[in-house]
Image: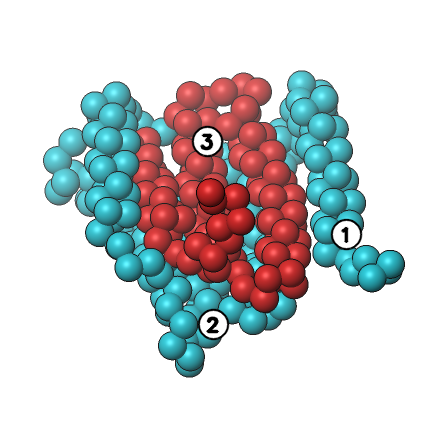
Chain colours: A red, B cyan
Amino acid sequence: MIVNQFLVVAALLFSIGIYGVLVRRNAVLVLLSVELMLTAVNINLVAFGSYLQDQLLAGQVFALFVIAVAAAEVGIGLAIVVLIFRNRSSANIDELDLLKW
Amino acid sequence: MEFADWISDARNIVFLVISLAMVGSAIRVVTSPNVVHAALMLVVALAGSAALFLMLGAPFVAWTIVLVYIGAVIVLFLFGIMITRAPTGRDSVRLDHERRWPAAIIALATFVTIAWATTVAFEDALISEGVTTADDLGSVLFSRYVIPFEVVSFVLLAALIGGIVLARKDPDQ
């Protein structure tokens, strides 16, 4: 197995995630697309760790850190989405134009 | 490396099947008109990434993905979908913007840039075959990386408190 096959699949997942972030209107779906992008980053980290044969296992350790931070991000993000929905009875991000002049 | 040489390895056939399933379900995540289907398709994509981690010799990270993402994060997403009453395809509320093509062009340009750069940089470099046990990972996590580990646990604590404070109803109102 060559390292580039994992990197190309991760790049594909990352660009699908970018498409989802740009095109989706619902805030929950934007968070789902962000999770796709984070998964692509994790694949990159572990693939590079396996390629470099690092004794300190930096790739896998930082993949675990990314997973933990992503879990925290989802918790906070969904709490914010629920709060916005409670105040404005809509979770569509293109209707949240309060800061637009 | 020629494609015929590459595909002659049985592991690469497994890799091809897994990655095709991942990419197909990822495309469904960003195009599905039903929010619940999008969340369940993300489960397929994450399970595929766990399988790739197993192929890369990182079983602990793979099972962490299964536990944390498929077990907890997706359930959190389903709760978020329920609470915000997101459209589930039966009503006519649109989930996408009108302008899909600029976004598709940006995504395609990103993919071409990254894939070209990695192909030029790494060409046929092979990955190592070794498997990292949870033993190795645990001992390095609690010696060399113990301070980042504690910082991450503090981040999780802050996120826990922040989530409770944000989501609970204000008793004064």
Residue nearest the viewer, comparing A64 with A73: A73
Q: Is residue A94 above or below residue B91?
A: above
Provide the secondary structure element on which disc 1 rests: helix
Q: Amino acid at mark 2?
A: Pro
State how far apart marks 2 and 3 are (Cα): 35 Å
Which residue is labeled 1 in the image?
B164
Q: Are marks 1 and 2 in contact (CB under 8 Å)?
A: no
Q: Is residue B80 above or below residue A98?
A: below
User: Which residue is found at the position 54% from the left and 24% from the top?
Assistant: A58
Circle nearer the N terminus (1, 2): 2
User: Which residue is found at the position 63% from the left and 40% from the top?
Assistant: A68
Residue under disc 1 on the same chain as residue under disc 2: yes
Residue B79 shows in this picture: no
Which residue is labeled 3 in the image?
A45
Which residue is labeled 2 in the image?
B87
Chain under numbered label 3:
A
Of the 4 image quadrants, the one containing the N terminus of chain A is: top left
Residue under disc 2 on the same chain as residue under disc 3: no
User: Which residue is found at the position 57% from the left and 52% from the top?
Assistant: B69
Chain under numbered label 1:
B
